[in-house]
Image: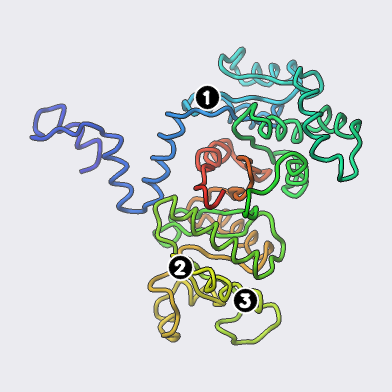
Amino acid sequence: MPPAVAKAAIDSGVARQPIEDLRRYARSLSGRLDPTAGALDAIMETVRENPRRVVFAEGEEEKAVRAAVAYRNAGYGRPVLIGREDRVKATLAGLGLGEVEGIEIHNARLSGSNKKYVDFLYHRLQRKGHLQRDCQRMVNQDRNVFAACMVATGDADAMVTGLTRSTSVCLDDVRQAIGPSQNGIPFGLTLLLGMRGKTIFIADSLVNFRPDAEQLADIVVGAAAAARHLGHEPRVALLSHSTFGDPAHDRTIPMRDAVAILDQRKVDFEYDGEMSPDVALEPSIRALYPFCRLTGDANVLVMPGLHSAHLTARLARHLGVGTTIGPLLLGMEKAVQIVPMDASVSQIVGTLDTSRPPAAAH
């Protein structure tokens, strides 16, 4: 029964066996249609039970302020806005919010934590050509670096940026203070919910322009772990314009070599490639290749390069093919999210909700 009907039956006494937890009941129903829905609801409950301190690096931007308020109102944790206090308060006032309890404002130039962050950054970068005054300037003047230092030193649990700068610039800023996770590779994962009635995961849609075979294998493992974390049994297709060597081309070699590397690693999920998207997603076409290892349609699509992944994810979003979440930035040693510049408030908050990857993918 739909949750509203079930609740009415309980309230009226018609139901012989009351449902103790209607939220869990609703999650179980949605999970039958698509495991992602149930998993996302479970993640949101976990976030509420373990609230986090999240830094919004572009704290003077209206969308960042709105997202911070929405994050706080949802009970996910304590938002921190980086910006000049008068500008942030003016934005809050312009939105009719005035003084909002539970939201912190930090000015990177005036913060009392500057020395701590400069010392941390200098220790990290001194053998990479940076003087202490360079680190001082970055902490004082670059809000992304300041926010990343907050997360790196444990003063915050996560950060979000991307509204005013391109992904590559933001990633370069963040990498000054936060590196990749141990034995991991940073990569982007986009979720297409409702795509063909299910969820499709696309990687790498954010970081690596043309990964080599070893990097592709790492991305496959990370993306599969994230899909499993969200309630799916991963079936990974390594995509290409070529299907199992036809037509042959030098650029298909990394995808084929990545499959060989995964064979050596003896991973515990289905994968195969290189193959075209129709082979990955259409049973009738896949039947022409009886040796293909996939027992069903692929739900994790690993692209040969950033260009194809980015184009696919953005086109799907703008053509209205289901609901898009991400790209999520995975594989960093700390929780960082870089949203698209045109991200909506709900997309910003949704990215933060979903950005608790499993240990294997983080």
Quadrant in which the N terminus appears: top left
How busy is the neighbourhood of tag 2: few (under 14 within 10 Å), some, or many (20 plus)? many
Residue type at numbered disc 2:
Ala
The residue beneath circle 2 is 298
Residue type at numbered disc 3:
Asp
- Please tell me whether mark 2 or mark 3 is closer to you in this view: 3
Secondary element at image label 1: helix
How busy is the neighbourhood of tag 3: few (under 14 within 10 Å), some, or many (20 plus)? some
Disc 1 to disc 2, C-alpha distance: 37 Å
The picture places residue 52, in percent across and down from the top left corner, at 54, 29
Q: Looking at this view, is 21 or 137 the one in front?
A: 137
Q: Find out whether the residues at labels 1 and 3 contact each other: C-beta distance under 8 Å.
A: no
Q: Which mark is residue 257?
A: 3
Q: Find out whether the residues at labels 2 and 3 contact each other: C-beta distance under 8 Å.
A: no
Residue type at numbered disc 1:
Arg
In the figure, is residue 176 to the left or right of 268? right
| Residue beneath the point at 48% across and 59% down | 200
- Please tell me whether mark 1 or mark 3 is closer to you in this view: 3
Which quadrant of the structure image shows residue 6?
A: top left
Asked if 227 appears above or below 14 in the picture, the reply is: below
| Residue beneath the point at 40% across and 46% down | 39
Q: Which mark is residue 72?
A: 1
Q: How many marks?
A: 3
